[in-house]
Amino acid sequence: MARFTRHWPLLATAVVLIALYATAAIAYPGFGSWFQFTRFFSDNATLGLAAIGMTFVILSGGIDLSVGAVIALSSMVLAVLMSRLDLSMWSAAPMVLVLGAAFGAFMGGIIQVFRLPPFLVTLAGMFLARGAALLLSDAKRIDMKDIESVRSLSERHIAGFSLAAMVLVAAVVIAAAVLRFTRFGRTVYAIGSDESAARLMGLPVARARVGAYSISGLCAAAGGVVHLIGMQAGDASAAFLLELDAIAAVVIGGTLLAGGRGSVIGTLLGVLILGLITTIPNYQGDLNTWWIKIVIGLLLLAFVLLQRAAQRWTEC
Amino acid sequence: MPDSMSRLVWPLAALALLLAFNAVVSPSFFHLHFAEGRLASPLIDVLNQGAPVLLLALGMTLVIAAGGIDLSVGAVMAIAGAVAARVLETDASAAAAVAAALAVCLAAGLWNGLLITFAGVPPIVATLILMVAGRGIAQLITDGQIITVEPGSAFLAIGRGALLGLPAPVLIALAAAGALSAAVRLTSLGLFIESVGGNEEASRHAGLDVRSTRLAAYAIMGLLAGLAGLVDAADIAAADANNSGLYLELDAILAVVIGGTALTGGRFSLLGSLAGAILIQSLSTTILMAQFGGRSVPVELNLVIKAAVVLIVCLLQSSELRRLLLRTRRAVA
């Protein structure tokens, strides 16, 4: 029974996703096609990657407002490295990933050492990364269409899945394995549910917290690389306020914002639900885009109330 | 020095430093002259353009002091402008438009408060819901269009009028600050809010109505966000549901934290938040006006400097840093 109550927020997410998908697939011709199915993964790869990193941070009881800005900064740095310094994708992309992880670790370190609220530190990180991205480019886009490796990567598909979609799926599998089977993963959960208990048990709290933020930075940087390949351009104003969608996806995916409970699989389902909702107006022409925001708000409300109910149920 | 004063030293010192920097780099900053029947000067402009953030920061101070946060204020601003513009379209009076907008925003604040106090939703998530949906609601009200207000409307006085040489938004912000200071100091509201934010459990045992206190903070926040939205809409003579108040929730939270109110709740300082809000706005104006060797400074630098300010202010307030510094000093000695 306890097992069931623990999992039913995730089940509810899955039911909503399947019901939405089935309804839309019946209502709109082409919505249920394999092509559109693969598009859900490709179109939401950047958001999905950011949301996976966000899951680690939220599970540890924190929050990361910088992910959208880090996506923009890493796509700009990659564009500058490749177009101005003539580096190849294979040497530039790893640098960007390391940079993203380091940026996250820096924020996590400040939060851990100085006991500062994650909200404020990552807000500063957001301003810093967005400002740096804009300064790098004089607020202009850097077009990458002429670079062969970017074009060929953006055209590569396997069974309809683009490179971005495959990166997303791989990231979900790796992240789920890390959370489930490693000591680090278990420590992240432990910090989120009760930090002092985790410390008393002798768990490496500091290392795990910094690790969670650096994973979020790494995932956001990967999102930036994927974004650059998809758009074939580096863009300093990319992913504006994407952190909100990422947080929404994590919450809809059944992860408690207070930390300690949730899963990466749930986050992927949450991302796909957001993707479905934003795609439906493409098929139904008279549906205005502001309905998307209202529906996402209502969904958030429903899931948050559901989580509260589930919590109270287990407490009884 | 009493504790309440010592917390005000840093924001006021930073503000003084920034103003001194301006006096040296761009002397025209303090140049006062009369234009179009009101005082004009970059200094007045700072207050004028900063009025929405000032108003938001006042309400946010109470919300944060009561142990919460409100991410939805930018969206509520957009709703206020949208409602006012729609009501004005029906040839109703400016007063009716203002009343309707404020009523809707009060309801928005109460909604946040009820979700937090009665449904037990964490403040970040509860207000995130309205932050996402609110902008959609504003766009629904305006039909996704920018609704302009007719040039002759009395409504525009809120954003463009002047009294005794001071622009209306500045007067509105100052009046709100005065009224709120009186409300929190002359009644027990301020004490209750500090008590709830400082220790919820103890407040409950002391017989304090924790829920109503929190609810009051969010209701006041809703009203002030509505006022900020009206000032913004009257200033540009239009309701722009996409951009009104965008990002301002972050500036407001920043202003409160710079002003010395801890994000963890408890003691607060309205004066500190005012100083914080003016500091943030002066930063943007300073960067716009500053010139080095004949070259203007890129506007994007504003974000980087803001980031540095947040980090420095946070670190100054961190007791861990103080402990570390003390330890190194002892080790050196």
Image (cartoon, rainbow, N blue to C red):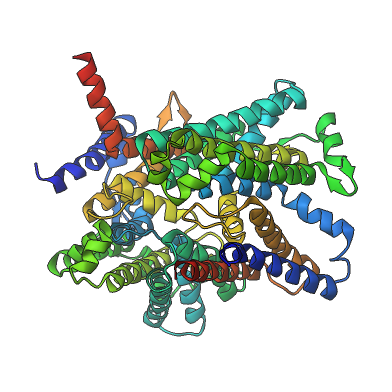
Q: Is residue A197 above or below residue A73?
A: below
Front residue of B61/A305: it is A305
**Spot occupied by residue B306 in the image (x, y as percentages of width and height):** 41, 39
Q: Is residue A196 above or below residue B134?
A: above
Is residue B49 among what the camera can see? yes
Asked whether residue A61 is in view, the answer is no
Q: How many marks?
A: 0
- For the point 46% across and 45% down, which residue is it? A191
Q: Residue furthest front?
A: A1
In the displayed structure, does residue B193 sit left or right of residue B315? left
Q: Measuring 43% from the left and 72% from the top, which residue is drawn there?
A: B119
In the picture, the quarter occupied by the C terminus of chain B is: top left
Question: Could you tell me which quadrant the N terminus of chain B lies in?
Answer: top left
| x and y percentages locating residue B248 in the rendered image | 44, 55
Residue lying farthest to the right in this orientation: A159
Residue B34 vs residue B225: left or right? left
Residue at the (30%, 59%) spot, across then down: B58
Residue B12 place in picture, x, y as percent: 22, 42
- The reply, left or right, for residue A86 in relation to residue B116 is right
Q: Nearer the viewer, residue A6 or B170?
A: A6
Quarter of image, res B204: bottom left
Query: In the rendering, at what x and y percent does residue B48 appear?
Result: 34, 55
Residue B202, relative to residue B296: is it above or below? below
In the image, A175 versus B245, the foreground residue is A175
